Amino acid sequence: MSNLKGRVHSIQSLGTVDGPGVRFVVFMQGCNLRCKCCHNPDTWELLGGVDYSPIELVEKAMRYKEYFGQNGGITFSGGEPILQAEFVKEVFALCHQNGINTCLDTSGSFLNDDVKALLAHTDRVLLDIKYTTDDLYKENVGCSLLPVLDFLKYLDEQGIKTTLRQVVIPTKSDDIENIFRLKELAKKHKCVDKIELLPFRKICQVKYDELKIEFPFGGISEPSKDKMDTLKSYIEEYL
Ligand code: SF4
């Protein structure tokens, strides 16, 4: 058995919003990006968190197995879980040995051999595509859209079920053109069977205040329910 340890920020024993069904959600410590809309700035630091071995996490998840039902299982989110790809791969391999479905919530900003090995044990990817243009990526994420598109292409080639997820941010991504670009991306990649639009929320302001850093999108309003319903109806026309 390896001595590999993962740095975990926090765990949600029974989550219902990060992947299908009821899920044991592990938020990993550390992120390589600095999205201006980020609602988890407390996960950014690479160091810190609580150390877990793969078996410790799987044993913890197994306690909730009866709640997972047909569709549920384990989800790794963050932070950015692919920064600790080797560790997550070991957990997912153990999950599969124990009949637990695996889901990875990632920004998909890079792809290397460790990430590919992890994806080989991943049943579904929640791909957080922050925007649909390179300009918006460079301005508001700190990386280019291109590696994310490469990541999506790889998911398609491997036939890994994918949910495209996007946070709707007024003045940035709440326009119909963005929704059409998102739908076009879904149409081009057969692995995509779902698009999820999530409303931008500012409840994280308190975390920025605690960290004594500025929330770059603190001055942007949350989208209205009507706006979200309208944009979601455009998505539903497609899927
Ligand atoms: S990838 Fe996620 S955790 Fe990292 S900065 Fe962006 S929103 Fe925050």
Image (spheres, helix red, strand yellow):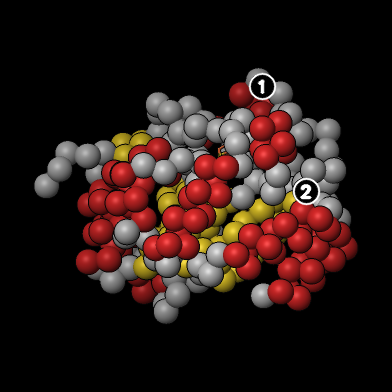
Instruction: Say few, some or many: other residues with alpha carbon within 10 Å of mark 1 (under 14 / 14 to 19 / 20 or more).
Output: few
Q: CA distance from mark 1 to mark 2?
A: 24 Å
In the displayed structure, 229 sits above or below 107; it is below
Q: Amino acid at mark 2?
A: Ser
Instruction: Say few, some or many: other residues with alpha carbon within 10 Å of mark 2 (under 14 / 14 to 19 / 20 or more).
Output: some
Find the residue positioned furthest to the bottom.
70
Residue located at (26% from left, 38% from top) = 5
Sequence-wise, the earlier of marks 1 and 2 is 2
Q: Is residue 130 left or right of residue 78?
A: right
Residue 163's disc number: none
Quarter occupied by residue 176? bottom right
The local secondary structure at tag 2 comes to loop
Residue 213's disc number: 1
Residue 74, position as x, y percentages in the image: 40, 61
Q: Is residue 76 visible?
A: yes
Residue 73, position as x, y percentages in the image: 40, 66
Nearest to viewer (mark 1 / mark 2): 2
Residue located at (66% from left, 29% from top) = 208
Q: Which residue is mark 2?
A: 173
In the displayed structure, 65 sits above or below 129; it is below
